Image (cartoon, helix red, strand yellow):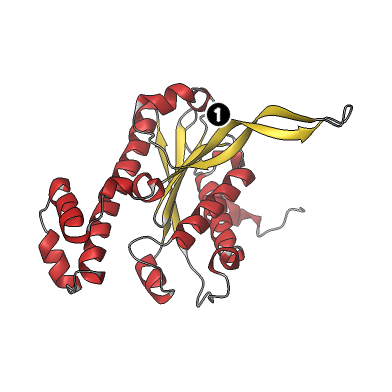
Amino acid sequence: MANSKYEYVKQFEQPDQLLPNVWVVIRVDGRSFHKFTTKHEYQKPNDDRGLELMNRCALEVCKEFTDIVIAFGESDEYSFVLKKTCTLFERRESKIISSVVSYFTSQFVYRWKEYFGEYPLRYPPTFDSRAVCYPSDQNLRDYLSWRQADTHINNMYNTVYWALVLKGGKTPHEAEVSLKGTLAEAKNEILFTQFGINYNTLPQMYRKGSVIYRKMVNEESIDSRTNEPTNKLKKRLVVEHIDIISDKFWKDNADILSS
């Protein structure tokens, strides 16, 4: 591009490079999603269509930005972890967060009908995003543990709350008052004794959230020479609903932290 007398305005742009050699987490979060889910009549306390759509959007983000080594989602939020050596957009924060959140949002709109069928998208959703740097592997693990623990806490509350409202005949205010200050044991007791619901048997996606990472999987293919079926181990992105707080996941997938 040719120089012009107006080019001096570039001096007002501020450098916003993220720290080098640290984990970068991009967290995408639904803006005013309580209103959005109400307007679109999401099922309470969990809507499988909405959760699966979020997972699909996140999966497409992981395909598009290959520096993402793991992602975790719950409700209307998703966290994407960029490897320490990531050089995407020269690590410019504004470019990274705007690219990830805009791609996620566009996927949400683009794939709406795949999950909600003929139910109309009444108005476009919006998501915000932020970038946070975590210097150590333990910091990163603690962040992801925090989000998964939050999934359990929020889901247990919402499960009891909506059972009281939808099945117990309580008003939203009465349900809030009933649950104020209660611990997990009391919430489990309400669910089981009043509604016959065993919280531990609810789908893992509700209780543990969703994890996206690359995993070795068996894939069937046809040998081009023999025309016989064969199995090959290949690394593929998967969406699972598993425990990432304990050490087992990280031992089984040590390559994530070593990436």
Along the viewing direction, whichever of 207 and 201 lies nearer the viewer: 201
Is residue 90 visible from the viewing direction of this image? no
Q: Decide if residue 209 is on the left or right side of residue 158.
A: right
Task: Give the x, y percent position of residue 137.
Answer: 40, 26
Q: Quadrant of residue 92?
A: top right
| Residue bearing the label numbered 1 | 85
Task: Give the x, y percent position of residue 161.
Answer: 22, 62
Quadrant showing the C terminus: top right
Tell how many labels.
1
Along the viewing direction, whichever of 144 and 99 lies nearer the viewer: 144
Q: Quadrant of residue 167?
A: bottom left
Task: Give the x, y percent position of residue 4.
Answer: 72, 57
- At a point 56% along the width and 58% down the height, the residue shown is 102
Q: Decide if residue 40 is on the left or right side of residue 151.
A: right
- At a point 38% along the width and 67% down the height, the residue shown is 43
Q: Is residue 199 above or below residue 40?
A: above
Along the viewing direction, whichever of 43 and 18 lies nearer the viewer: 43
- At a point 33% along the width and 36% down the height, the residue shown is 145
Q: Residues within 10 Å of mark 1 (few under 14, many from 20)?
A: some
Mark 1 residue type? Thr
Q: Is residue 221 above or below residue 187?
A: above
Q: Secondary structure at mark 1?
A: loop
Q: Decide if residue 142 is on the left or right side of residue 21.
A: left
Is residue 186 visible from the viewing direction of this image? yes
Q: Is residue 169 above or below residue 217?
A: below
Task: Give the x, y percent position of residue 245.
Answer: 34, 33
Q: Decide if residue 231 is on the left or right side of residue 180.
A: right
Q: Is residue 70 above or below residue 30?
A: above
Q: Quadrant of residue 219?
A: top right
